[in-house]
Image (cartoon, grey):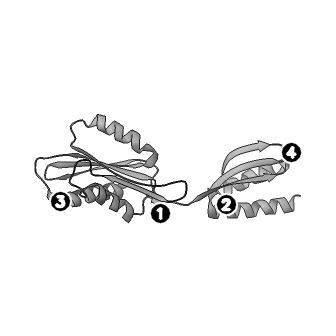
Amino acid sequence: MTYINISYTNTLEVKQSKFITYLVPIHEYKGTLSSLKEEHPKARHFVVAYRYLNTFNQVVEHSSDDGEPKGTSGKPSLMVLQGNQLINSAVIVVRYFGGTKLGTGGLVRAYSDAVNLVLDKAELKEYKEEVVKKISFEYTHIRQIEYQCSICRISILNKLFDTKTIYEVKADIKSMEEFLCRVDRISSIYP
């Protein structure tokens, strides 16, 4: 699976109709759609499609034709996202009608091409499932633990200093396994 972490845009023109495509991270979707509707008051359609992972790691998908003939715009846009295994991302296609009807096949091609064009510009990142763990250790090991965090690309979410030091850490599964192995060695070397 892949995802994006910044927004991209591209424009496709087909028979005087303009298809302005925005590819955005899912957390920017609602705000971007709202501002695009204000920015483009004369646009005919705002076709959307998105895919994201919910809290159970299930892919949630949605698409909307926004007044285009059923199945000619939202679904083809979603299928391009599916084909690229893109998650946690949304696509918004702003269409200005150019006066020439494209027909159902023409619309499917135009929306698919518009989404593919913006994806060609995008830098797709590989998605890795992340886990959160709590580790506890002696206060004297802080320097070694934080060094291992930097080496293994571990994010420290929270620090608690009590009779033991407790860190809440987050990383992808492989990095976390390597990190926990290194932490175990530190604990056994320096009891």
What's the distance in space between the residues labelled 3 and 4, CA to CA?
68 Å
The residue labelled by disc 2 is: 176
Local SS, label 1: loop
What's the distance in space between the residues labelled 1 and 3, CA to CA?
30 Å
What's the distance in space between the residues labelled 4 and 1, CA to CA?
42 Å
What's the distance in space between the residues labelled 4 and 2, CA to CA?
24 Å
Identify the mark nearer the N-term, 4 or 1. Answer: 1
Identify the mark nearer the N-term, 1 or 3. Answer: 1
The residue labelled by disc 3 is: 104
Local SS, label 3: helix
Would you place residue 121 above or below residue 27 in this image? below
* Residue 73 image offset from top left, x and y in percent: 26, 55
The residue labelled by disc 1 is: 1
Task: Tell me the residue at 50%/60% (across/down).
Answer: 58
Task: Tell me the residue at 37%/41% (across/down).
Answer: 32
Q: Which of these two is toward me, 95 or 143?
A: 95
Identify the mark nearer the N-term, 3 or 4. Answer: 3
* Residue 54 image offset from top left, x and y in percent: 51, 54
Numbered badge on residue 191 = none
Q: Amino acid at mark 1?
A: Met
What's the distance in space between the residues labelled 2 and 1, CA to CA?
19 Å
Tell which residue pokes out farthest to the right in this image: 191
* Residue 44 image offset from top left, x and y in percent: 21, 43
Q: Is residue 164 left or right of residue 124?
A: right
Crowd around label 4: few <14 · some 14–19 · many ≥20 (10 Å): few
Local SS, label 2: helix
Q: Is residue 153 left or right of residue 160?
A: left
Q: Amino acid at mark 2?
A: Met
